[in-house]
Image (spheres, rainbow, N blue to C red):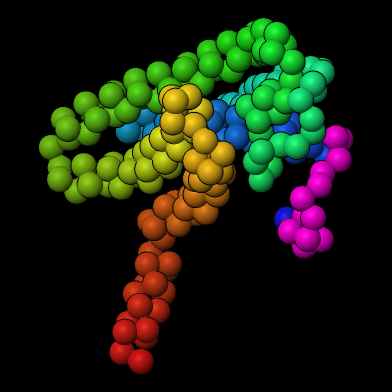
Amino acid sequence: MANALRDTRAISYQGCSAQVFFFLLFISAELYVLTIMSYDRYVAICKPLHYGSLVGSRACAQMAAAAWGSGFLNAVLHTATTFSLPLCQGNAVDQFFCEIPQILKLSCSDAYLREVGALVFSVSLVFGSFVFIVLSYVQIFRAVLRMPSEQGRHKAFSTCLPHLAVVSLFVSTATIAYLKPPSISSPSLDLVVALLYVVVPPAVNPLIYSMRNQDLKTTMKKLILLVIFN
């Protein structure tokens, strides 16, 4: 944003490393918070009588601390590893922000091995979070389908669907960005994909989560009617 306002494409080395650190911190923390939210919904639907003891204020504080602590560790690990590599192929990052894959392209070819340990750590955390979310929702859907009341099923699904939509959006965009085949990679495609996972989830998340807010629904309906009939 600062570069856009100043009409420049340059960023300092320290600014680039700070950008990488905060990007990884927030994207990691979001994944872990989404994982915690799946546990919250599991307890609320599958063990409602134990909700107060399992998801109390102390437990929430501990889980939030674990999420941000893990995100901080992941960000420090990747940032330190990436910026300890010598840049042998110039200093022009072929992206609109400092992205690790693009920075690694500027390093020496044999330096990628130093990123393997950090990558294994991150993949393990991401895979563990994904498995936990899937298992939580398997149990949730089993419990919901056993509910005799249609109103109860509707309430349970309305609680889970916004979270599922955000998880799906987050995972799908990140998967496209980092697991696409190298054969189809190109500067223009990398730019579009980066915009997809950097801009779309943060922009859509508030809308998805607020759709259960009755006041917002009423206001949106009035706004749509106003636009249509005026």
Report x, y in % for residue 77.
73, 18
Count of numbered labels shown in the rendering: 0
- Magenta-drawn stretch contains 40: no
Report x, y in % for residue 51.
43, 31
Range covered by the magenta-colored residues: 2-14
Q: Is residue 211 left or right of residue 86?
A: left
Q: Nearer the viewer, residue 202 or 86?
A: 86
In the image, what residue occupies the spot 53% across and 16% down?
Answer: 123
Q: Work out whether 1 lies above or below 69.
A: below
* Rendering quarter of residue 160: top left
In the image, what residue occupies the spot 51% across and 21% down?
Answer: 126
Q: Is residue 109 visible?
A: yes
Q: Is residue 51 visible?
A: no
Report x, y in % for residue 64.
62, 31
Q: Work out whether 113 lies above or below 130.
A: above
Q: Nearer the viewer, residue 107 or 143?
A: 107
Quadrant where the N terminus is found in the figure: bottom right
Q: Nearer the viewer, residue 158 or 79?
A: 79
* Rendering quarter of residue 224: bottom left
- Magenta-drawn stretch contains 12: yes
Q: Work out whether 53 lies above or below 220.
A: above
In the image, what residue occupies the spot 48% across and 24% down?
Answer: 182
Q: Nearer the viewer, residue 199 or 229?
A: 199
In the image, what residue occupies the spot 49% across and 31% down?
Answer: 185
Q: Is residue 148 left or right of residue 177?
A: left
